[in-house]
Amino acid sequence: MLTLDEAWNSYLATRHLTQYGYLTDMSRYRVHLQNYWHGKGLTSIKTLDIQLYTNHLFAKGLSPQTVRLCLGQLRRIMRRAHRLGLLEGQLPYFEMPPADSVRYRYLEPDEATHLLQILGDLSQLWHDIALLSLNTGMRASEIFSLRGANINIPQENIILHKTKNLKQRIVPLNEVALDIIKEYRKRNSELLFHQEGSSNKQFVKISKKFRKAVDLTGLNDGITDNRYRVVFHTLRHTFASWLVQRGVSLQVVSNLLGHSSVRVTERYAHLAPEQGRNALKFLPYIS
């Protein structure tokens, strides 16, 4: 009888995951899946069991998006086992809870300055990581995995070989971002940003220092809707929002963010209502 632990080991052995993806999946498995499904045979898992597990996750106080991630990981493990011939029969149905994970909050320049000032007092490292995200739009996982080989100083860019979409992306560097990259490249030979005391130990999650800095700014005071709370990803959202507000086209912003499609970037369109009107000025005058 194939257990989930055995299927999980097969999943890891046959899937191509980035280091960050591996660490994230491993953490989620250990925290939210392993204990609940320990010793459970996969063939005995029915649709009802999946629904009960969903209820269990919500009872733990997890957000709909986190519940979706847990269910998605369980489904991937079972599908992989099925494809490898380790699991036979029909797979259970996974009813994914609706989750609007789009974040609408972005920082005004004075808010960003205040946050960075407080963060700098708490940790220069995390100040620089946050400032880099704010100036490049890079995801936390992309910054965490940066190595010297990704840096092209003469052309002033970063080459990301493995992004969330598993596509290569070139990230241009402005003066602020370039100064940060140069400084940390001088210090570290392996990972540019690493956990304290180990030059090859990659960050897996956002430091508590960042969350403490946000708390000290009061930016989240009274806000209960996660879509409007300031988190590290807000820096990436702010990067895109500022560009769109200053007239940069959605296509260019989409390329900079590494979105799979410009449709994903269209969430920022409302920030530049004048762009369409201004575009009409280029039409020839015919009456």
Image: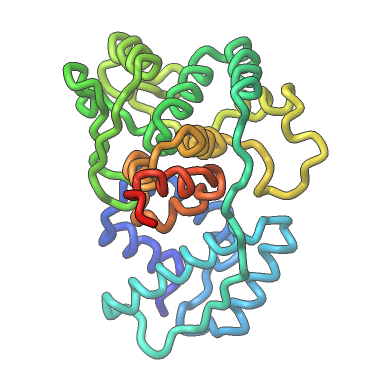
Residue 81's x, y, as percent? Answer: 34, 74
Q: Is residue 157 left or right of residue 109?
A: left
Q: Is residue 134 above or below residue 72?
A: above
Q: Nearer the viewer, residue 166 or 202?
A: 166
Q: Residue furthest front?
A: 287
Q: Residue furthest right?
A: 222
Residue 199's x, y, as percent? Answer: 35, 20
Q: Is residue 199 left or right of residue 231?
A: left
Q: Is residue 232 left or right of residue 87?
A: right
Residue 192's x, y, as percent? Answer: 34, 21
Q: Quadrant of residue 75?
A: bottom left
Q: Is residue 55 above or below residue 172?
A: below
Q: Nearer the viewer, residue 222 or 274?
A: 274
The C terminus appears in which quarter of the rendering? bottom left
The answer to whether residue 204 is seen in the rendering is no
**Residue shown at 58% from the left, 55% from the top:** 101
Q: Is residue 214 above or below residue 30?
A: above
Q: Nearer the viewer, residue 277 or 265?
A: 277
**Residue shown at 48% from the left, 36% from the top:** 236
> What colour scheme has been applied to the protein in the rendered image?
rainbow
Q: Quadrant of residue 57?
A: bottom right
Q: Quadrant of residue 282?
A: top left
The N terminus appears in which quarter of the rendering? bottom left
